[in-house]
Image (spheres, rainbow, N blue to C red):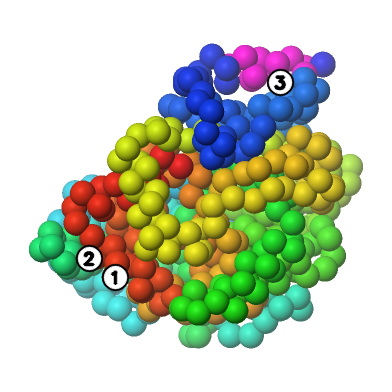
């Protein structure tokens, strides 16, 4: 009863905080079909699908409460939410996905002024790059930016092989009595160039490193990849896209002339117990909302579940192995019912409707988007399946015409964005085409406009200028645009 009252209160709170805007009649305005909400402002990413039943909305609110509330160390009197750690980077799902939105790189004290100095002994520069004189000192540790780790080879399911000491990601926090794994360092190098009309631009190239490593050095051949937490709107709809459509995208691109040759990433799903086309993660390395959610509970908060029942402590982390656990009736720290409610919550987060769809500058930008072949990878629309899919029992997401602007495929994006780290069938130069829906609301929701897998781009145009590889031809067309054309292109993307 208490949870139900909390759920009703949460729904009322969401409704009170939302800024509802007027609807128009264009089909592509309703980005999520019947699930679409007409909302903007700070809470634009936090509404349930518009077509959920009252019972489903209650379940949505219960899942929301577990998504946003902090977990605590075990043992604790709050047994429903204990079990944090031993290592972690956030105390709640909402700690990374603030307002269900996108993360950003850590804050800086002095913007991007040159910072003299060299790495201290013991620091771990990545990619062979010097960390001196390339940006500004970081004064907070990343939360919504995590560092994936692996060494050459594959695990039993064909995924990345973990660093033998630090596992598959660096956790910069720990419970009492356990050492944090380490801290991240970050500086930026400024790269400058010009559009063909002479207009200057600058890009920020990040250089990462580690310091204060708690368990000694990493493997000498460790590979590292920074990953920003993405916004969560529409993830259930993305899972409802038929797998045949993703395969068709790859087949059509393979048969077509030109450089665009996307690939499906076949990845292991713990819930299905088999390999499936990847849909989530910056390298499409996760197939379902369920696997993504349970994996993040373990990796980011140290919360065990039925499919991820072992703490992420490596053999050399003896303090981690000895730390208290918050195991409950099922022998894990989040039971199946609670986990399912959190999965349901994320899967039914509604995409907001497009804005300014009839604006002439936006329409001009839409034409340019197609003209320079952005839509070759950012496929505009799909119709979701009528059948069930693993993460969701609700039928609210079935049979919807949606407009996510993605092909869910891997593409070679060139040396500039390469992390050199394979992930299942993705190589070190490949990244998944991210959905574009909601991109124009990130500033309202999260107070920034940082884009790409590590947040290096400060807006849409910078993100385009980092494109290379298969997208080099499209980037060159954008470099040749007039200022008015560039502004129109950005306005269109920001209307999504």
Q: Which residue is mark 2?
A: 480
Marks 3 and 2, how far apart in space?
52 Å
Name the image quarter holding residue 76. Answer: top right
Secondary structure category for the residue under label 2: loop
Give me the disc on residue 244. none
Q: Is 114 positioned to the left or the right of 74 in the image? A: left
Secondary structure category for the residue under label 1: helix
Give me the disc on residue 476. 1
Mark 2 neighbour class, 10 Å CA radius: few under 14, some 14 to 19, many 20 or more? some
- Disc nearer the start of the sequence (3/2): 3
Horizontal and vertical percent position of residue 295: 69, 56
Q: Is 429 positioned to the left or the right of 395 in the image? A: left
Instruction: Look at the picture and state if 174 lies above or below 222.
Output: above
Magenta stretch secondary structure, dominant: helix
Where, quadrant-wise, is the N terminus in this rendering? top right
Q: 146 or 9, which lies in front?
A: 9
Residues shaded magenta: 2-13
Instruction: Look at the picture and state if 407 lies above or below 341.
Output: below
| Mark nearer the viewer, 3 or 2 | 2
Q: Which residue is mark 3?
A: 7
Q: Are marks 1 and 2 in contact (CB under 8 Å)?
A: yes
Q: Is residue 115 visible?
A: no
Secondary structure category for the residue under label 3: helix
């Amino acid at each position: 009863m208490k949870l139900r009252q909390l759920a009703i209160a949460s729904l009322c709170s969401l409704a009170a905080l939302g800024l509802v805007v007027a609807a128009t009649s264009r089909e592509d305005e309703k980005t999520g079909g019947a699930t679409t909400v007409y909302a903007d402002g700070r809470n634009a990413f936090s509404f349930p699908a518009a077509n959920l039943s009252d019972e489903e909305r209650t379940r949505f609110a219960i899942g929301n409460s577990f998504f946003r509330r902090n977990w605590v160390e075990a043992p604790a009197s709050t047994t429903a939410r204990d079990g944090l750690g031993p290592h972690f980077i956030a105390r709640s799902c909402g700690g990374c996905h603030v307002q269900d939105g996108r993360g950003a790189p850590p804050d800086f004290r002095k913007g991007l002024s040159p910072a003299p100095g060299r790495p201290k002994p013991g620091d771990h520069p990545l990619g062979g790059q010097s960390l001196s004189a390339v940006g500004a000192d970081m004064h907070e540790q990343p939360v919504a930016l995590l560092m994936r780790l692996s060494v050459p080879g594959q695990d039993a399911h064909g995924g990345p092989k973990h660093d033998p000491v630090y596992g598959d990601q660096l956790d910069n926090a720990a419970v009492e009595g356990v050492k944090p794994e380490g801290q991240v360092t970050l500086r930026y190098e400024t790269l400058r160039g010009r559009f063909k009309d002479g207009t200057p631009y600058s890009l920020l190239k990040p250089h990462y490193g580690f310091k204060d490593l708690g368990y000694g050095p990493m493997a000498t051949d460790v590979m590292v990849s920074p990953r920003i937490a993405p916004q969560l709107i529409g993830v259930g709809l993305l899972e409802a896209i038929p797998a045949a459509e993703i395969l068709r995208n790859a087949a059509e691109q393979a048969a077509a002339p030109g450089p665009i040759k996307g690939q499906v990433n076949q990845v292991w799903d713990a819930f299905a117990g088999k390999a499936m086309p990847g849909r989530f993660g910056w390298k499409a390395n996760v197939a379902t909302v369920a696997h993504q959610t349970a994996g993040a509970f373990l990796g980011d908060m140290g919360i065990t579940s039925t499919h991820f029942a072992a703490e992420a402590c490596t053999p050399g982390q003896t303090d981690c192995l000895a730390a208290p656990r918050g195991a409950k009736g099922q022998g894990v720290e989040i039971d199946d019912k609670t986990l399912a409610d959190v999965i349901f919550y994320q899967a039914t987060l509604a995409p907001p409707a497009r804005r300014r769809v009839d604006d002439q500058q936006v329409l001009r930008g839409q034409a340019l988007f197609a003209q320079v072949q952005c839509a070759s990878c950012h496929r505009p629309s799909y119709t979701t399946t009528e059948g069930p899919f693993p993460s969701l029992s609700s039928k609210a997401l079935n049979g919807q015409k949606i407009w996510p602007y993605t092909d869910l495929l891997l593409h070679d994006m060139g040396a500039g964005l390469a992390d050199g780290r394979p992930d299942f069938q993705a190589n070190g130069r490949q990244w998944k085409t991210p959905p574009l829906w909601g991109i124009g609301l990130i500033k309202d929701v999260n107070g920034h406009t940082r884009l790409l897998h590590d947040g290096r781009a400060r807006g849409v145009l910078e993100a385009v200028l980092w494109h290379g590889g298969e997208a080099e031809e499209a980037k060159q067309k954008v470099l040749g645009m007039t200022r008015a054309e560039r502004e129109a292109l950005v306005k269109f993307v920001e209307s999504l």
